[in-house]
Image (tube, rainbow, N blue to C red):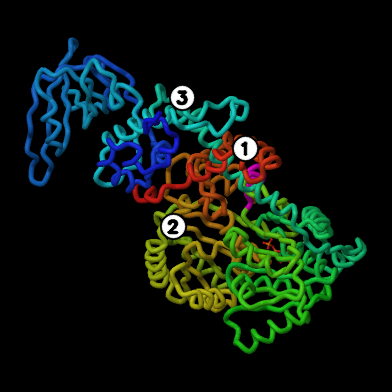
Amino acid sequence: MLESPTSNPDILDAPIRVALPELARSAPTLLRLGVASPRQALFYLPFRYDDFSDLRSLRDLVPDEKQSAEVTVDSVRIEKGFGRAPQRVIAQLRDATGTAEAVWFGRRFVETRLRPGAEIIVSGKVTERGWRRQFTSPEFSPAGRESIHTARVVPVYPLTSGVTQKRLRNMLARILDRCLPLLDDPLQPDEHTGLPGLREALRTVHFPEDTGDVQPALDRLAFDELLALQLGLAQGRLARASLRAPRLAVEPRTVEEMVAALPFELTADQRTAIDEIVTDLGSDQPMRRLLQCDVGSGKTAVAAIGLAVAVRAGWQAALMAPTEILARQHHGGQAPLLDALGVRSAFLAGSLPAAQKRKIHDAIEGGEVDVVIGTHAVISEAVTFQRLGLAVVDEQHRFGVGQRASLQAKGADLEPHMLALTATPIPRTLALTVYGDLAISTIRQMPPGRQPIRTEIRDRSALPRIEAFLADEAAAGRQSFVVVPLVNESEALSVASAEAEVERLRSRLPHLRIGLVHGQQKAAQREKTMRDFAGADLDVLVATTVIEVGIDVPNASVMLVEDAERFGLAQLHQLRGRVGRGPHRSFCILLSDADDELARRRLDVLRASTDGFAIAEADLELRGAGNLLGTRQAGLPPLRVASLFEPRHLRLAERARELATFIVATDPALERRPALARLRSDFAPAEEEGDAA
Ligand code: ADP
Ligand code: MG
């Protein structure tokens, strides 16, 4: 018997026009939304809902609320707008209890479907206009028939030009009806206990009976998305389990001697991290460890011991940083420590003269250099290690996975151990979830004797006093950072505001030397300005957030952040960490005119605490589903449905991790579970999504 097209599950992945010929004319529109197949349509999700489920008599309409009414159309008229205002279609409505109006702007076609005498259901927001109640641009449908547009919870989707909510809703409802029954649940019932089945979840997410049903349905989708992520991580772990690394084992006595050779007593956290790293290095399982630190908590020394252990065991090591200036600073910090530990290090950067680079390459290849410190570019390009045993990667999230992999290949047949450093504290549960394949060491204690940084919140009216303060600090030989806000995440606009700020400060403080760095400058120019600032040839450095990670200027004593409420707390904490690195009393001034309660409370968290981990937790709590850092910046995977900042989803992530580990252990390539193998693509972000918002 021939299968009818709509009973064949393959049509889920066929082009829309093939799968559902009756929607052929809509296919190009859907394609512009990133929807090519019915499966993609099922996963094209609303971003909010209009709850029109309250059906009221006209007498009982409540202004400023969304609601519905079953009415008779009394009359319809079209009014021309004044000047350029669009024309309006106005309908007089009536029911047994009273009258109301409905108005639509510039939509003449509405009128053709609204004859006087028609019985309709209108759904929309009601406003009070004098003595009249008015539905503004409501949805409507014939009375006596169920509709997906009225008198219920109605989904609102991201749109693109040329399609209305109503039309898209009709298309998606059609696709759901025809194709949802063909979709198999990739999970068995016992694998999603407490969460709805996939079909039910998708139906509910698109057309919920009740807004209260949406959250469990979204949780189910979030679980599947997190499972896709965790399956990938579990496969990676399994693949690596068969890899071998060199055993970089040294006598415990050797480690003690190295620790004793450091110019200070280690904190307990530093000591623990070192022990964890040394243990990993002594195993033939490649180390994959993240060293998570609060700013200024002293990860340099910990990394130095790791590098030295690798060298003492007879191997070479590398330390990579995302920018040349950071690499230089690492070298500056590491070289004295490594010298003290008897390790020969070299700095390598693209900007060095070719002859010098060649010499260093030769020395690395010949084994005369033990540790190379540089940017990933120079290390991955032409360098051949004799035997690379350990790669330390700073601010690991700034490197793509590919770049990390290319360094690893330098270890020839054995995998080098890898230690990633990050000064971006994230809560432990979150770290475990997203870096599921990394072991984690944490340093949150500060070395003793730190000068506390005084944090103040001020509004713009305090600017003159703040400027005077910057001038005083400069007169005392100190330096200041001024960070301008992110403007709608747009670097170009931020640059414009940074340039304006430099002009303003130069005219207010003509005797100060004021420099500017931003992300759109050439790297060389930016690095020169940073060097000038580091060398105290500038008093004030105005910057977009490019300075956020890692430049070390102990003479800087003031961090002024403008429109501070626009930054994530973790980011502000990073910025604050740029000062208080020397013997000088230091200040962080958060400039903010925001008067909403949440913004105030967030900034207060920062004023009250200097513990980056506590701040990250508090930010998570205050913002809930908000965005801790910008997922990209934190190196977190982009997720469409799940939010790693949502405690409920974080728990789901842990569950997903267990399930993924279990599944992959018996079926590494997911051959027996093709529906699971496909999960990832269900949640791949639609191309056009960004534009639609
Ligand atoms: P970060 O973790 O931000 O990279 P660093 O490793 O640069 O921090 O250390 C910050 C400063 O603290 C450096 O000047 C370093 O010499 C100093 N330091 C690190 N550990 C200790 C310690 N245990 N006792 C005293 N000073 C320390
Ligand atoms: Mg440092």
Mark pair 2, 3: CA separation: 37 Å
Tell me which numbered mark, 2 or 1, is placed earlier along the sequence. 2
Residue 428 lies in the magenta-colored region: yes
Viewer-nearest of discs 3 and 1: 1
Q: Quadrant of residue 397?
A: bottom right
Q: Which residue is mark 2?
A: 486
Q: Amino acid at mark 2?
A: Leu
User: Percent x, y for residue 137?
Assistant: 21, 32
Mark pair 2, 1: CA separation: 35 Å
Instruction: Please identify the dominant SS of the magenta region.
Output: helix
Residue 213 got which mark?
A: 3
Q: Which residues are magenta?
A: 425-433
Tell me which numbered mark, 2 or 3, is placed earlier along the sequence. 3
Mark pair 3, 1: CA separation: 22 Å
Would you call the spot at circle 2 few (<14 residues within 10 Å), some (14-19), or many (20 or more)? Answer: many
Relative to 159, is 412 above or below? below
Does the beta carbon at disc 1 come under 8 Å from ligand 1?
Answer: no
Marks 2 and 1 in Cβ contact (< 8 Å): no
Q: Is residue 418 left or right of residue 247?
A: left
Q: Hey, which residue is sitting farthest bottom in the picture? A: 355
Q: Is residue 45 left or right of residue 357?
A: left
Residue 656 got which mark?
A: 1
Would you call the spot at circle 3 few (<14 residues within 10 Å), some (14-19), or many (20 or more)? Answer: some
Q: Hey, which residue is sitting farthest front in the picture? A: 1
Q: Is residue 527 visible?
A: yes
User: Percent x, y for residue 478?
Assistant: 58, 70
Residue at 42%, 43% (x, y): give it. Answer: 595
Does the beta carbon at disc 2 come under 8 Å from ligand 1?
Answer: no
